[in-house]
Image: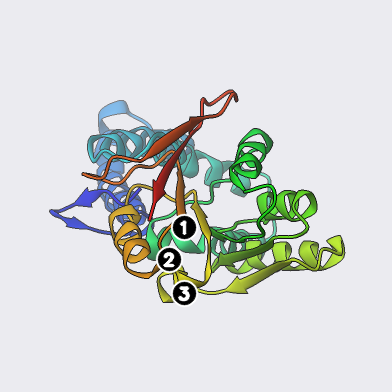
């Protein structure tokens, strides 16, 4: 995430909205001329389908990832469909609010909500020492499923999740309390405002954007012998000390650095 837009790193949310707004304005003013050429008014659905295709094309040219391209393509026609179904007006701000609460980190930190699968959680469990308790941190813990799995299977160790997306944090905190595992906790905290020195193992599944800064922070704060683990995303110019390949469908790789 975090594409270069206009020569600077910008929020993909704002960039995507800007693309839609500009194309909507262009098509809105072009609609009467297109209608005059065709001999009839251009239907709203045709207009929104055109906007979706053009938005997806521009988004792809700006080298956004494919989920952003797909979202840009389908958003305008979906809006027309919602209007055709006569959905109540309040449902649109509600959907927007829920999206903001879930994908809060996309706008601020350009980090999407990635969920660690069960095979990767099992691989992380194997990285923990069998006889020595450790303090494990998940930076951007999402819904907390990975930490709940680890906490149940390594009761002597301590597990802490850091999350700033409001809805995932609330769900992970609630599920953690219901799970009854005393070695598990969640903090509503920016990962760059957390001292990493208290953790023996730090795990993250973020995006390419924050990795250089996060690795520099880990080097400065983590104790000698501690372990920094990144799911899939590497650090430019810093070859990992080891790579664990997970036998899952997406061929996940855990990149390991010893501090």
Identify the mark at residue 1; answer none if there is no mark. none
User: What residue would you read off at disc 2?
Assistant: 223
Q: CA distance from mark 1 to mark 2?
A: 6 Å
Tell me the mark number nearer the camera, choosing from 2 and 3.
2
Would you identify the image quadrant in which residue 47 lies? top left
User: Relative to 246, is 129 above or below?
Assistant: below
Dot 1 lies on which element? loop
Task: State the image coordinates of residue 157 (x, y, percent, origin top left).
Answer: 70, 60
Mark 1 closeness class: few <14, some 14–19, many ≥20 residues within 10 Å: some
Q: CA distance from mark 2 to mark 3?
A: 14 Å
> Is residue 39 visible to the viewer in this orientation of the structure?
yes
User: What residue would you read off at disc 3?
Assistant: 194
Q: Label 3 near label 1: C-beta < 8 Å?
A: no
Would you identify the image quadrant in which residue 159 lies? bottom right
Side (left or right) of 138 relative to 223: right
User: What residue would you read off at disc 1?
Assistant: 226
- Tell me what residue is drawn at x 38 percent, y 32 percent: 40
């Amino acid at each position: 995430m975090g594409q270069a837009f206009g020569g600077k790193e910008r929020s993909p949310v704002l960039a995507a909205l800007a693309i839609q707004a500009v194309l909507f304005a262009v098509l809105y003013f072009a609609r009467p001329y297109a209608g005059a050429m065709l001999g009839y008014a251009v239907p709203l659905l045709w207009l929104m389908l055109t906007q979706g295709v053009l938005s997806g094309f521009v988004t792809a040219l700006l080298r956004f990832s494919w989920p952003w391209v797909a979202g840009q393509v389908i958003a305008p026609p979906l809006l027309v469909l919602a209007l055709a179904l006569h959905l109540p007006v309040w449902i649109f701000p509600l959907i927007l609010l829920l999206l903001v609460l879930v994908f809060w980190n996309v706008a601020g930190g350009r980090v999407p909500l990635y969920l660690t699968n069960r095979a990767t959680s099992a691989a992380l469990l194997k990285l923990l020492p069998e006889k020595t308790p450790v303090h494990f941190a998940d930076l951007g813990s999402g819904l907390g499923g990975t930490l709940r799995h680890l906490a149940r299977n390594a009761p002597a160790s301590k597990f802490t999740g850091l999350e700033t997306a409001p809805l995932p944090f609330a769900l992970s905190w609630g599920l953690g309390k219901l799970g009854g595992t005393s070695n598990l906790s969640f903090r509503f905290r920016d990962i760059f405002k957390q001292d990493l020195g208290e953790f023996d193992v730090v795990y993250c599944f973020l995006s390419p954007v924050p990795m250089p800064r996060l690795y520099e922070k880990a080097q400065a704060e983590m104790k000698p012998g501690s372990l920094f683990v990144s799911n899939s995303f590497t650090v430019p110019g810093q070859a990992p000390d080891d790579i664990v390949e997970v036998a899952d469908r997406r061929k996940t790789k855990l990149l390991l650095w010893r501090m």
